[in-house]
Image (tube, rainbow, N blue to C red):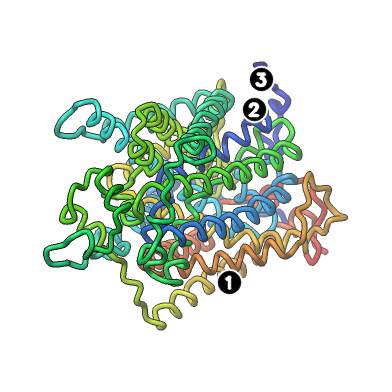
Amino acid sequence: MAQSDTDVDHTAHGQSMGLLRVLGPAHVWALGVGIVLVGEYMGWNFAVGKGGAYAALIACWFAGILYSCVAMIDSEVTSTVAAAGGQYTQAKHIIGPLMAFNVGLYLVFAYTMLEAGNAITLGFLVDTVAGMTGHEGGLDQRPFIVLAIMFLAWLNYRGVLATLTFNLVITAIAFCAIITIFLATSPLLGAGEMLHKDLMSGQASLPYGWLGILAAMHFGLWYYLGIEGTTQAAEEVRSPARSLPFGTLAGIMTLLIAATLTWYICSGLMPWEYLGDGVNGAVAPLFSAAQISGSSALVWLLGIGTLFATLASANGCINDASRAWFSMGRDHYLPAWFGAVHPVYRTPYRAIIFLVPIALIFALGAPLDQVITFSILSGLLGYTFMPINMIMFRKKWPLDTIKRGYEHPLHPLPAISLMALCSVTYFAVFLGYGTQLIAMIGFYIVVSLWFHFWRYRFVKRADQFTMPWPRPRGY
Amino acid sequence: MARYIPPVQSKLGQIIDVIVLVVLSVGALFLPLWLGLAGSAKLPVPVENPTWESLGQNPVMVQQWNKLGFPDAASAHDMITARYDYSFSWVSLAVMVIVIVGYFVMMIRFSDIEYREVIAEKFGEK
């Protein structure tokens, strides 16, 4: 495929070297769905443990509404902000530098923690497959975790087109694997092994009552967490105004289907206590569902699906975290050294390399549910920013002042719904993980003060505003 | 408005800034783990001489437990009886709300001060 050099000479940031504009809508879909689809293969089932299978289904749909709002809001703003950094760049232009610095860190943490979670799952999968093929005593998972992260970082280092084309192929295979196991096990075409009625009767229906439904929202986010990452590709797609809304909205539709099918398959085959225990029970629930189906073909297919989903997600996370880190370096929010573009591969290579050991610290040193929680908390803070961002965007630049590639309907209803669902999710996180929530917000308060009173002095003022927009109303 | 010229930061200063940020991040994420305050572990509720019936499992559930490699009730006991404790204090909830709202209010106010400088320099004073 030929690579376009349309932006080689000068970017909006005045640099002599920019990122390559080589991506299309399919790559945007692959980036968003690739990051998220692993959520169907692992992690979502902690929601079952928090409230039972019905609670996990309700959380799945309410989180689906939350993310539909995220996708619509993001699509409108990002169709006008064609620069790397995604929500970081949006915040910089719409709310202000300190908010942007915080949003940039939310993105880096959400994606780096998710990358670590993917690597942990990959290590588990290799260990399980080794056990199934006769290896005794368990494998040391650490070399596989390190190798996976290093390989994907290398791929990202070498170029965005190859990285996201790789993601497109393996994400499509992982999605097809979910469709296949659904068809093979449901009464629609397959053997009709689904046992929802018996597995969800009596105490198993809502073991914690309505409080369990609220609690399940915590891990309900995991079904879709990361779809907002499509915006990170804004500086590398050929037609941002068309490709980004198309790829993002197609992505959320794909995920709504995949999440509902995943819940249906797994809760129809496994008791909720096993399914909801993502540490000692169903670490990779779709893989467990394939094992319980008794079909070795499905076991291999879902094993490959799990492997590909974890790789695609970690790959997309490296891509997105590095773009956010790179963008902050380019604006001097972080040392400018991180804002460099590789002279040959045209990738943010220093940011890619710098984040590798950070991901490894967490992949090798923290348990899966904690890593997931760290990622969810960063994501949740980011989703809380989005409705504020959207309302300010429409206020400062009404529809007649900037041409949007996409205008989301029913404003401000999606923003209000998103804020309400975020509030519910904060309460869900508070039920059990309140300490992490407070620790994380304490961290953001400290770094905000550090940025405002120290770091911001190294930032040029007007140069941060790179979009060709008119003066915002009220300023 | 006069154009703001930022000072040039030394290489050592840049390295120190990155180290500060990494130490703060790793500390915030690992501190609850090191202090044993992280997350809510499920706690099993012991049942004497457990049977599938006493654990509330119907025949279909038992069949699926067997397929998953749990041949008897004792082997699945800990997993079946483990429960989260969702009790909480309203004071803690109020503290959490104040911290979250206070954080966002602080951020929007500081951001607005910085944003006004950016706009004034970019578009000129009104």
Asked whether the viewer can see residue A143, the reply is yes
Residue B105, label in figure: 1
Asked whether the viewer can see residue B11, the reply is no
Give the alpha-carbon distance from disc 3 to disc 2, as whole Å.
8 Å
Q: Position of residue A358 (x, y in %)?
A: 37, 43
Element marked by disc 1 = helix
Label 3: which residue? A3
Residue type at mark 3: give it.
Gln
Chain bearing tag 3 is A
Residue A120, label in figure: none
Label 2: which residue? A20
Q: Position of residue B7 (x, y in %)?
A: 56, 50
Q: Is residue B14 left or right of residue A329?
A: left
Q: Residue at x 34, y 34 (%)?
A: A294
Residue type at mark 2: give it.
Leu
Q: Residue at x 32, y 52 (%)?
A: B60
Element marked by disc 2 = loop
